[in-house]
Every structure is written in C-alpha cells, then in structure tokens.
Image: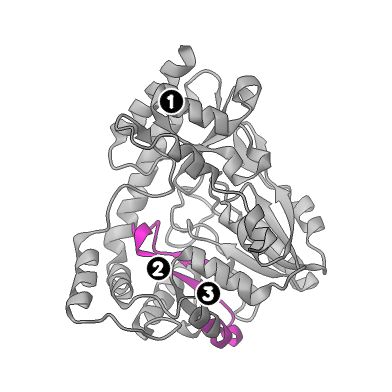
C-alpha cells in the first residue's frame, strides 16, 4: 500500500456519524444532501431506460443527447458552451478526480482555497502533488477571501489553482470582480484553474448573479481555450445525489484525452442515469427553481434561529445548503469541533459535521446542512442545541 494512501485522514464527518449509529432519536444534519427525492418523471425516465434494456456500455464522454442538453443548459446560464467541451462523469467527485489526473504530475504545486470539502484536498495528495492552502478568514461569522494573499500564492510554479465557489462548507461565493482578477492572474502565470461549481445554482444573493440566478461562474468570463476546467453535478440542484452523475467543462482541445481517462477510470456513466438526467434538464424549470426557493426558505428559517442563540456566531450564507457556525468563538470546551460534535450526538441527540473535516482553519466550527423537507426539524434541532447549551 502506498504511504500516501495509508496516511490519508479518514472522514471526520463519518467519524461523528458512526458515533450515532443505531440511535432512532437523532436529528441528523451532517451529510451534504437533501432528504427529498427527485420528481417522479425523473425516476420514471430511468425505469423506462432499464425496461428498454439500456444496460450496456456507452460513449466514454456520455450520451450525445445529454452532452447537447448540458450545453444548452449551461449556455442559458453562462453564455455559449458547446457540446464538444463537455464530458459526462460518474458524479461530480469523479469529474474532479479526472481533471486532476489530467493536469497533475507528482510534485506539482497546487494552490487551494480552504476550508473546503475534504475530497478536494485528498485528490491532489493521492496524485503526489504539493498543496499550498490559502485560507479564508472569518469575520463576524462570514468567511472572506484575502485576494492579495491568493494572488501572491499563485506563481509560475503553480500548476493548478482549485477553487470551490460557492463553497462547501462556508457558503462563501466569489464576486465577478474577484473571478476576473483570478483569471487574469492565472493567464499571466500559466496556471490552470479547477473550479468546483457544484453549488452554482443554489445561490440566494439577488445581486451579482447570472441571468438566471446562478452564482458568478468562470464560464461567464473565460474563453473556450483558457486553462480552465469547471465541474458541475446533478446532485444538488436536481436532487440526484445518489445517482452519481456529473460533468466537466474543459477546453475542446482536451476533450479527447479526458475521454481516454474516463475509459481507464469508469469506462462511462450508466445509461439509465443519463436518460434520467436528460429528462431533468428538459424539465429543469420544474425542478431547480422550486429546489432553490425551498432551500432559501430552509436557510431563512434556520440561520435567524441560530443567530438568536446566545454565544453562536454565524453569518447568512450567500449560497449552498449549509450554515457554518461556532459557539463562543470556538474557544475553551468548544475549540475541538470533533469532540463537540460527538457530545452533541450523545447529549443533545443532534448530528452535525465538525469543522475540522474541512481544514485546520475551521477547528471548532460546525456545519449544519439545512436541506430538509420539514422546516420543523430545523427548529427542533435549534431547540435541542439551545437546551444543551443551557444545561
């Protein structure tokens, strides 16, 4: 076994979740997914495909109909994106790994904005790359990017810049001006940008977004041949987390080689999930606006309740499906987020993700996924937190 694999940290979210296994009384908000299933017509499209016997291999890059559908969808959100720039992958995480395999050699330097979903840190490490984190900084519960620090970190020696915006776990999002500065700088240094924009459509800021409410995207401002790869997924805005279907937008000159990588990783995404995704895109206006409106309602229910709890610090997230907060400044008995999360499981019946899962700079923080069909569960969870803090 390679040493880097042995040394990879196990999921701290899973560590906390394992502490609560078998407890029926838990209110759990630790995993990053909605508890709502996709509409019947999406599920039925998959059933119809299976009944037709569509159970064999297909094109490495995805069904042509799905690639064309994604091109149309992304073009409506961000301006012209052609189908020859799109690779369909077996989940967003697979798209990220494919992109890193395409770009990184052992020893390459990777700058990454943190705190961040741990897979984005583990993937370059697995490939033997050297990480240079640039942390966001909390200010009154909001996480802010020091643009000067980021641009100073990205030099001609930097092979890849990884940016997850809108962010898991913080809800931070890039502004258009920040994206323009980053793109211009990376053009000068010759650095590739890998933009994880899985949460792009879960955007609640009325100002600064795209024409259909999406968060600012590098696709809005980049040319097709820029050193840019953008990852998307059906998991969040289409409620298809377990379907494992994502996509990668890349320069057209890279598409053929990425198809080879997909062949040697997963061969192709399953046909029946792609058929479901085609239907989801065709009826996106029946799915995503409702999902975003409900998630905004969830956010606007949970965050004010948490902000009213004495000692809790957080800001209203601009995007995503998470409230990221800390108690009493993350000091004293609340400084260790893993221990705190385990105590909340054992003593309050409340399941949250520890901030340490996303990087050392978020030690003592907690992530609460607010994607819940039942708003009362959110209120009940805050009640349990408040009662525990008073005890």
**Residue at 40% from the left image edge and 34% from the top image edge:** 20
From the image, state whether disc 3 or disc 1 is nearer to you. Answer: 1
Q: Say what secondary structure mark 1 lies in.
A: helix
Locate residue 302 relative to residue 2 in the image: left or right. left
Q: Label 2, on which residue? A: 245
Q: Residues within 10 Å of mark 1 (few under 14, many from 20)?
A: some
From the image, state whether disc 3 or disc 2 is nearer to you. Answer: 2
According to the image, what is the colour scheme of the structure? Answer: one colour
- x, y percentage for residue 118? 58, 52
- x, y percentage for residue 14? 48, 44
**Dot 2 or dot 1, earlier in sequence:** 2
Q: Which mark is residue 100?
A: none
Q: Say what secondary structure mark 2 lies in.
A: loop
User: Could you say which quadrant of the image residue 75 lies in?
Assistant: bottom left
Q: Say if mark 3 contacts mark 1, CB within 8 Å.
A: no
Q: Say if mark 3 contacts mark 2, CB within 8 Å.
A: no
- x, y percentage for residue 253? 60, 87
User: Could you say which quadrant of the image residue 383 lies in?
Assistant: top left
Task: Give the Cα separation between the discs numbered 3 and 1.
Answer: 44 Å
The residue closer to the viewer here, 190 or 260, is 260
Q: Label 3, on which residue? A: 249
Q: Label 1, on which residue? A: 346
Task: Give the Cα separation between the discs numbered 2 and 1.
Answer: 35 Å
Whether the magenta-drawn stretch holds residue 60 is answered as no
Q: Residues within 10 Å of mark 2 (few under 14, many from 20)?
A: many
**Residue at 17% from the left image edge and 77% from the top image edge:** 51
- x, y percentage for residue 99? 59, 72
Which stretch is magenta? 230-259
**Dot 3 or dot 1, earlier in sequence:** 3
Whether the magenta-drawn stretch holds residue 250 is answered as yes
Above or below, 250 against 364 in this view is below
User: Could you say which quadrant of the image residue 384 lies in?
Assistant: top left
């Amino acid at each position: 076994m390679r040493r880097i694999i042995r040394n990879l940290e196990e999921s701290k979210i899973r560590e906390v979740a394992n502490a609560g296994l078998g407890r029926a009384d838990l209110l759990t908000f630790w995993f990053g997914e909605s508890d709502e299933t996709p509409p019947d017509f999406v599920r039925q499209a998959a059933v119809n495909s299976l009944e037709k016997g569509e159970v064999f291999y297909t094109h490495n890059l995805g069904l042509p109909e799905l690639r064309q559908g994604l091109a149309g969808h992304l073009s409506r959100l961000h301006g012209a994106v052609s189908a020859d720039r799109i690779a369909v992958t077996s989940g967003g995480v697979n798209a990220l790994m494919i992109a890193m395999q395409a770009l990184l050699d052992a020893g390459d330097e990777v700058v990454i904005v943190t705190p961040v979903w741990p897979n984005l840190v583990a993937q370059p490490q697995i490939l033997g790359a050297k990480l240079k984190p640039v942390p966001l900084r909390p200010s009154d519960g909001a996480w802010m990017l020091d643009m000067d620090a980021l641009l100073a970190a990205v030099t001609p020696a930097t092979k890849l810049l990884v940016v997850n915006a809108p962010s898991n776990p913080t809800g931070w999002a890039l502004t258009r001006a920040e994206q323009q500065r980053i793109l211009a700088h990376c053009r000068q240094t010759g650095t590739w940008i890998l933009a994880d924009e899985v949460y792009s459509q879960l955007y609640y800021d009325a100002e600064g977004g795209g024409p259909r409410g999406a968060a600012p995207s590098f696709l809005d401002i980049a040319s097709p041949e820029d050193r840019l790869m953008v990852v998307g997924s059906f998991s969040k805005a289409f409620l298809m987390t377990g379907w494992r279907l994502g996509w990668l937008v890349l320069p057209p000159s890279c598409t053929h080689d990425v198809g080879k990588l997909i062949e040697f990783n997963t061969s192709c995404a399953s046909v029946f999930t792609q058929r479901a995704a085609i239907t989801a895109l065709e009826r996106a206006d029946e799915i995503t606006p409702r999902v975003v409106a409900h998630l905004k309602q969830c956010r606007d229910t949970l965050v004010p309740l948490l902000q009213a709890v004495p000692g809790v610090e957080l800001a209203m997230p601009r995007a995503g499906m998470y409230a990221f907060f800390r108690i009493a400044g993350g000091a004293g008995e609340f400084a260790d987020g893993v221990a705190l999360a385990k105590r909340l499981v054992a003593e309050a019946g409340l399941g949250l993700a520890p901030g340490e899962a996303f990087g050392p700079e978020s030690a003592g923080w907690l992530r609460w996924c607010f994607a819940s069909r039942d708003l009362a569960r959110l209120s009940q969870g805050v009640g349990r937190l408040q009662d525990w803090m008073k005890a």
